[in-house]
Image (cartoon, rainbow, N blue to C red):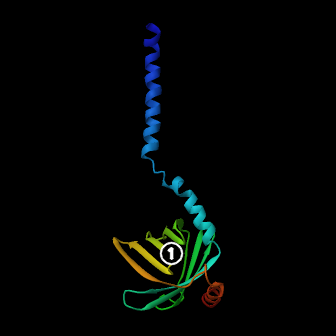
Amino acid sequence: MKTFLNLLPWFLVFVMILVFIKGYNLFTPQYERAMQPANTQAIKELSFKSFEWTYIDTDKSRNKFAVNIYIKKIVMIGIEGSLEGTKIIAKPQFTKVGEMLYFLTWTTKIGQQQSIVLDCKNNRIHTHINSNGRFWGMSGKITCNAFTDDCKKIFLEAKKKYN
């Protein structure tokens, strides 16, 4: 009995450490590890693909972008509309959501949260921007889809013109 009482405090400390570790793992976000296969698959499928997509802006003007996706990086060049000549470079989180359906999200240098839902199956693009307490979205069409068309020429011409 005396041996049991001598070991009891050590046993309780050991149990408390296990409970602490379990609680820490329970409340620590595990999404990054869980999403890793989807991230890897999305990066593999989208890398070195070029697109052209068109948004109708809030003022009903049309903005067209030439887009190239590299490994873990996206480059968008405005080729028509109020954003013509604008070059956006981002390193988004890539996630494959479904068949030819991808979610890309990133934070800009000024703290804006930007997201893209890229629906290559239905040639649709949706962008969401969260900045300064405001949230807005734009929808558009993928007018040149890298999964069905050769769009490299569009991006290379835009890169040459606006660099």
Amino acid type, label 1: Leu
Q: Position of residue 69 (x, y in %)?
A: 60, 75
Q: How many marks?
A: 1
Image quadrant holding the N terminus, namely top left
Quadrant hosting residue 75: bottom right
The residue at 43%/19% (across/down) is: 9
Residue 89 in the image, given as x and y percentages of width and height = 56, 75
Query: Which quadrant of the view contains residue 77?
Result: bottom right
User: Label 1: few (<14), some or many (≥20) within 10 Å?
Assistant: many
Q: Secondary structure at mark 1?
A: strand
Image quarter of the C terminus? bottom right
Q: Residue furthest top?
A: 2
The image shows residue 88 at horizontal and vertical percentages of 54, 78
Which residue occupies 47% across, 37% down? 21
Quarter where residue 12 is shown: top left
Residue 122: percent from left, percent from top: 50, 79
**Tag 1 residue:** 118
